[in-house]
Amino acid sequence: MDNGKNSSVILFDGICHLCDGAVHFIIKREKSPGLHFAPLQSNSGKMLLAQYGYPKDYLDGLVLIEKNRAYDRSSACLRIAGRLKLPWSLFFCLLVIPQWIRDPVYQAIAKFRYRCFGKKASCSLPQGVEGSRFL
């Protein structure tokens, strides 16, 4: 897949219920359907992780790849928010807050996501979502 200016990919933890819910949330609220998705655990996900300098076993949460650049943690979430309909797109403005302040909040959620939201026995695509959006 071309990861140029017109295509963006969200890599997500395919066994995490919170991440699964986030994918549904994003798809329902996108301004225009231009995002593609891939589980971090998939071959496509691992290939993209390696391409952008992440370890192949990276599972620390969402990674957004857009315009040939990768963003993770709070930067990924806020940039994704910028692609959503109002009022969610307003969260994009929080990028002005330094990352060293934003990321600890993200990391706290990521650390406890399995305990609070649970996880699947195996990686699967979110149910009820158009398959062409997934790599």
Image: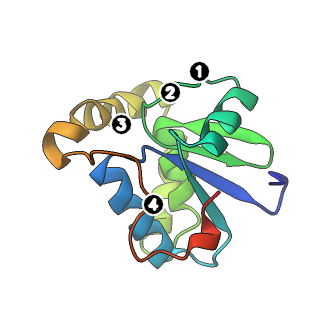
User: Which structural element holds mark 1?
Assistant: loop
Q: Which residue is mark 2?
A: 58
Q: Is 38 rendered above or below residue 33?
A: above
Report the amino acid beneath label 1. Pro
The CA span between labels 2 and 4 is 18 Å
In the image, what residue occupies the spot 68% across and 46% down? 65
Image quarter hosting the N terminus = bottom right
Distance Cα–Cα, label 2 vs label 3: 16 Å
What is the crowding at mark 3: few (fewer than 14 residues within 10 Å), some, or many (at least 20)?
A: some
Depth check: 69 or 88 in front?
Answer: 69
* Mark before the other along the chain sequence, 2 or 3: 2
Q: Earlier in the sequence, mark 4 or mark 3?
A: 3
The residue shown at (41%, 31%) is: 103
- Mark nearest the camera among 4 and 1 is 4
N-terminal of the pair, mark 4 or mark 1, is 1
Q: CA distance from mark 2 to mark 1?
A: 5 Å
Disc 2 residue type?
Tyr
Identified by mark 4, the residue type is: Leu
Q: Are marks 2 and 1 in contact (CB under 8 Å)?
A: yes
Tell me the tag on residue 125. 4
Q: Position of residue 108 (x, y in %)?
A: 26, 31
Q: Are marks 4 and 3 in contact (CB under 8 Å)?
A: no
Q: Vertical placement of 20 versus 44: above or below?
A: below
Q: Are marks 3 and 1 in contact (CB under 8 Å)?
A: no
Q: Position of residue 131 (x, y in %)?
A: 57, 71
Q: Which residue is mark 1?
A: 55
- Cβ–Cβ below 8 Å for labels 4 and 1? no
Q: Please tell me whether mark 2 sits on a helix, a strand or a loop.
A: loop
Q: Which residue is mark 3?
A: 106
